[in-house]
Image: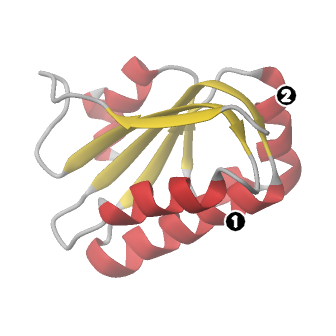
Amino acid sequence: MSSFFISEEPAAEDIVPGDAVLLAGGELDYEASPQLRHQLFERITPSTRRVVLDLSLATFIDSTAIGVLAGASKRLAEVSGGSLAVVCTDENVLRIFEIAGIETIMELYGSRDEALAPSARAG
């Protein structure tokens, strides 16, 4: 059984209206993907500009979870013209993103501060 968690981060000063922030950690695999998808897609509305998914506590991601992220990114663009920003610090997870070519369809950041910076929201 894999270890996985996901939670919505409480509103903070650096989170602007139209943004949602989720924190997910552990192993993002086949078992975790339905919950990850549900949590992401639940936040995609016509008023959602960005979803920031903080994976700084993630230790593994597989192709199923990559597919969920790609689907969420596409759905955000279709529903609101919004974007998905992913915070990732684990070298193994970053390598999987690189192999999958995922950085072409979503924004990758090395820290939550970078992802929530005004310059990140503008781009």
| On screen, residue 98 above or below 45 | above
| On screen, residue 11 above or below 122 | above
Residue drawn at x 31%, y 26% as measured from the top left: 117
Q: Which image quadrant: the N terminus?
A: top right
For label 2, the crowd category at 10 Å Cα-Cα, with few meaning under 14, some 14 to 19 and many 20 or more, is some
Q: Which residue is mark 1?
A: 67
* Image location of residue 16, percent across then percent down: 14, 38
For label 1, the crowd category at 10 Å Cα-Cα, with few meaning under 14, some 14 to 19 and many 20 or more, is some
Frontmost residue, 98 versus 24: 24
Frontmost residue, 3 versus 57: 3
What secondary structure is found at the residue carrying circle 1? Answer: helix
Inspect the image, locate mark 1, and give the three-letter code of the amino acid beneath it.
Answer: Gly
| On screen, residue 45 above or below 49 | below
What secondary structure is found at the residue carrying circle 2? Answer: helix
Res 88 quadrant in image? top right
Q: Which residue is mark 2?
A: 92
